[in-house]
Image (cartoon, rainbow, N blue to C red):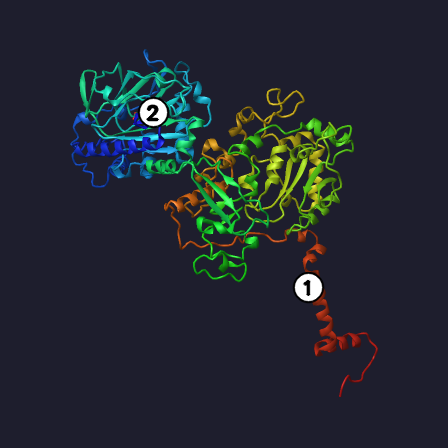
Amino acid sequence: MDELFGSSDSDSGSEVMEAEEKIVEEERQTQEQPVPAILRDDSLALETDLIFQSIMGSDYDDTSDNGDDHLLSNPHIHATHTPQPRHEPHPHIPGFCLHTHVLSDADENKLMTQITERNFFKAGQQNQAMCFGKRDLAWLEWLEERMIEKGVLVEPYCHSEWSSRRPLFDQSIMNLYYPGNGIKPHVDLARFEDGIVIISLLSAINMDFYPALNPMSPNDPPQGHTPTPSSVDESRNPSFTVRLEPGSIISMQGSARYEWEHGIQETTQDLVNGEWIQRKIRVSVTLRKMRMSAWEVGSVITGAALELVSRTMADQGKEYFILWWSKWFDTDRYEGRLTNDCGLPYTCRHTLDRSKYNESKVIVYHDWNSKDLAPLNDRPQPQAYQQKYMSLFTYKFTYHFGSDFIGSYFTSGLTNAEALINLVSRPPFRTLEQKNQFRKTGFHELESRPLAPVIWVVSNCKAENGRHFMVNQLMKFINIDIYGRCIPNRAWPKRQDGKTEMTDEELVGHYKFYLAIENSNCEDYVTEKLVRAFGSGSVPVVDGPEDYSRLTPSEKSLIRYDDHGSPEQLANFLKSLDNDDESYLKYLSFRSAHTTENTDENGQVRIHSPETFNRGYKERLLPWFVDNWDIDSSGLSDKKTTEWPSHDGSRRTSRAKYGMQWGPDYQGGLCALCRVAHDLTEGKAVIDPTKRLAIDTTCRFRKFYYTSWIMAFYPYWTLFALVMLGVLLSVTLTGVGRRAIRRVVLKAGRGVKGRWSY
Ligand SMILES: O=C(O)CCC(=O)C(=O)O
Ligand SMILES: [Fe+2]
């Protein structure tokens, strides 16, 4: 159905209109068809019937299954052993390959179950569905694995050079064919890259090939190609016909992709070796990758239906306001800021201008300063920061990964969706030999004081949790170089040129250990500090949330303060690693090594070529880390953030429809907010008016006041003094006090026998 998208005026809106008309047309044709027989066979489980039912609607009549032999035309289904995959390049269509026996019956069932669960075909009312972005394709991971395992993408004479691209596929079309349905001969649209695969499911069909009347070139503008007019099709005879068995895959690249048209005739029977074979229901899955310049039409949207695409295309170029009613920590940070890098065709403009209230569908309050509320309806004014107050808002936008919109400092330090994997994959900024050298001779000739093993960079001097006490304690046992505004013991160094200053990451990268200690201890509260440690290749000594599992790239990659009984023990542990190169390096072994390929002539990491660091990262990193953060395994997606796996297999779920959709820029929350702004303005939003929020109560407040017993009283010194005064007064003034004093006095043995009062 692709040809329908390529209308000659290349107006994207009308493409969809045409596609929708086509669907209506096909539905009409479908209704005219005799009800097709259902393939029923012992070797396909009952599930398959259920799948048919749900594709076609529960009123679909399957009683016409009379068990006729001709219905069981699929040899694949009857095989008693698992046939080996075969890879057959076409002798006359360069770049075309037929891969048979790739998916087993179980694989097919699994795929069909997932397609059915998503109700892509709306119980038979729709015969095509599209997905953009890997996030929608939960099954893609194992499907890709299966293809690789069965040699689909590695077969040398099928020339799949494109198979190393990443992501491999990010767009798919599901097509449903009733007997009599087809697809007009076409060249797939220019907006897709070279290298396309089509997976056939449920039953076999003949696919025809014609030399393209209007061949395409890979360099054609993504939307500029004019397809073959459909009037030509009628009189054409195919040059070649290929039988596509269920479980088989075809791959097309080069000439096959650009210079040949493929199509399926609208007939109920196919000619196979001189015999007419009755068609049955068939489903195909076409997998492709969009060319980058084509994203504006597809965008990263969820759902399968065309309506989503058409809706976003119609919104091309629009702008929506997001009003920050209360400022972010009293700053102008959001004034005029655009959210325009989320893969959406529209943008959002953040504003602090309250006169935009009526135009803004999303109003944000920062609870730091949010007693001042907009005059929303008859909302009562809040009294204080409390649960009742939270219930006045609809959605929560916080650092917590369970928020409706995530605004994490952790992710805001990252620049794109693959950034975290790249950071943890690249070699440390400095080698261990260099770090050992810096321990003796400082940064360079101009800054030659030896470096401490540990660095701390701090700007918030009086963190709520009292982390400065903890560092104070630690410093008694190990040297720490402290930079920043609070208690620096070392000046921020310049680079070797003596003029320019080092960046945070460069500085930290010179040290063996970096204190990534958060200013509060709350669930999911992790900031850019940890990212900085990963970026620099210094080993992070962390403290923050209780659970770091989603942020731990390998078994040995973080040192947790809490894993050591006391500051002294932690210091001794760090010192032992400082003196034991082999043990220290274990904390960096999940990263790439320094090689000439990934470092420049000075031995410094070339941070611009992530591909060279990423190789083999799946073997080096913990699976749940990859699962959480790798865009390739549909990471940073709705799935990831709504069902975020952790090492113990537990999953968190978010309740909100818009929850946690990360944009390619890692601004997650902002991208998702912009989508809500769009949807509310266009009257498409689904907001649950009964939804109420809870304050995050996970914070372990003032944790480090308890690292020493004297400090334990620190926040309460005033209280302590008051209590002591109270005790003193009661002792002197009350009867209890007087009696106590008398006992003490009597005990003192002065021998006083008289009475205190008569
Ligand atoms: O269903 C098929 O096998 C062909 C699908 C196709 O060519 C397409 O979606 O572009
Ligand atoms: Fe196609």
Provide residue 18's location: percent of width, then percent of height.
29, 31
Considering the numbered disc 1 on the image, is that residue within a helix, a strand or a loop? helix
Q: Above or below — where is 454 with respect to 446? A: below
Instruction: Kindly give the residue lying farthest to the top in the view shown.
Output: 91
Q: Which amino acid type is shown beneath numbered disc 1?
A: Leu
Residue sitting nearer the eye, 158 or 307: 307
Considering the numbered disc 2 on the image, is that residue within a helix, a strand or a loop? strand
Give the residue at mark 2: 198
| Quadrant position of the C terminus in the picture | bottom right
Q: Which mark is residue 439?
A: none
Q: Above or below — where is 738 with respect to 555? A: below
Q: Which mark is residue 719?
A: 1
Residue sitting nearer the eye, 636 or 370: 370
Q: Of marks 1 and 2, which one's residue comes earlier in the chain?
A: 2
Q: Is residue 85 left or right of residue 643?
A: left
Q: Which amino acid type is shown beneath numbered disc 2?
A: Ile
Residue at (71% x, 74% y) in the render: 730
Residue at (73% x, 69% y) in the render: 725
Residue at (23% x, 16% y) in the render: 236
Q: Is mark 2 within 8 Å of ligand 1?
A: yes
| Disc 1 packing (10 Å; few <14; some 14–19; many ≥20) | few
Q: Is residue 70 left or right of residue 87?
A: left
Provide residue 604's location: percent of width, then percent of height.
65, 25
Residue sitting nearer the eye, 355 or 425: 355
Provide residue 703's location: percent of width, then percent of height.
63, 52
State the image quarter where residue 739 is shown.
bottom right
Q: Quadrant of ligand 2?
A: top left
